[in-house]
Amino acid sequence: MENVAIFGTGLIGASFALAIKAAGFKGRVLGVSSPGAIRDALACGAIDAEATAEEAAGNCDLAYLAQPIGRIIATLETVGHRFRPSCIVTDAGSTKVEIDAAARRHVTNAQFVGGHPLAGKETRGAREADANLFRGRTYVLTGPPPAELLRCIEAIGARPVIMRPEEHDRVVALTSHLPQLISATLAGTVAGEDLTVSGPGLADMLRLAGSSWDVWEDILRTNTGQVAAALDNYIARLQQLRAKLPDLKAEFERANAVPKPGRR
């Protein structure tokens, strides 16, 4: 693998580029992004040169699409047919069904395997890029990966997990999208209250409420059905909890028995 093209040189794309370089990649990394994002990615050493989408698609061995979901789909639509047969195309989008469908329609020569690294920061942009961002994190792949892509994912310290796109979107609706909406709704509920009269628990619960709508608009648009099902499930459980007030011992015991993320 000699040439890697990063489409979208923000936090995830730039971090991926830094990670593969730290893992020993000696080839050339091209960046396709906005002028400001390219400037920051060059400054931090994530990419070696800027390229147009057409130039990058025709000259890369690995294409890494790290744009917002709508832009990933647009990239597949416009240059998907330009990737060479030897090229591996993957993405880092937070939902998978619509991206996978677009790839099947438009990536006509190269091999596409969808991806979703469950990694990130509250801050954005290449200035915040980190070569260790993926270390120890789950990295979903939506199909059997080519050996070279699997080696790359493992080399940056991530833990690859293979899931169908539909199953991925169902699971993340519960484990990622629902927590985001709970946090946003809680923020609206306590808005206008004296938040100096609160403990660290509220701050923990409101952390996600600071997320950008620019990121979440595409996520919710491309996973509406699964998110609605997750909300229905949660609302039903809230109604059951309300009906049992104040006798919630069994609810607390069940909650305490659920393994917490990150704990083994």
Image (spheres, helix red, strand yellow):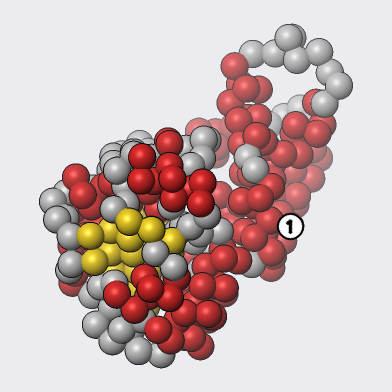
Q: Position of residue 140 (x, y in %)?
A: 38, 61
What is the tally of numbered marks visible in this picture? 1
Q: Position of residue 85 (x, y in %)?
A: 28, 87
Q: Quadrant of the N terminus?
A: bottom left
Residue at screen point 57% across, 73% down: 74
What amino acid type is highlighted by mark number 1?
Answer: Asp
Res 45 visible: yes
Q: Would you place residue 245 above or below residue 100 in this image?
A: above
Question: Label 1, on which residue?
Answer: 232
Indicate whether 17 appears above or below 88.
Answer: above
Q: Secondary structure at mark 1?
A: helix
Q: Residue at x 25, y 73 (%)?
A: 61
- Dot 1 surroundings within 10 Å: few (below 14), some, or many (20 or more)? few
Q: Which residue is more in the foreground, 153 or 37?
A: 37
The picture quadrant where one finds residue 97 is bottom right
Tell me if 56 is positioned left or right of 236 in this view. left
Work out which quarter of the rendered image holds the C terminus and state it: top left
Q: Is residue 101 left or right of residue 42?
A: right
Q: Quadrant of residue 169?
A: bottom right
Q: Position of residue 26 (x, y in %)?
A: 14, 56
Q: Residue at x 61, y 51 (%)?
A: 215
Outermost residue to the right:
192
Q: Quadrant of residue 114?
A: bottom left
**Left of 123 or right of it: where is 143?**
left
Answer whether residue 164 is visible to the viewer in this image: no
Q: Residue at x 62, y 22 (%)?
A: 203
Position of residue 97 relative to residue 67, above or below, is below
Q: Which residue is nearer to you in this view: 82 or 208?
A: 82
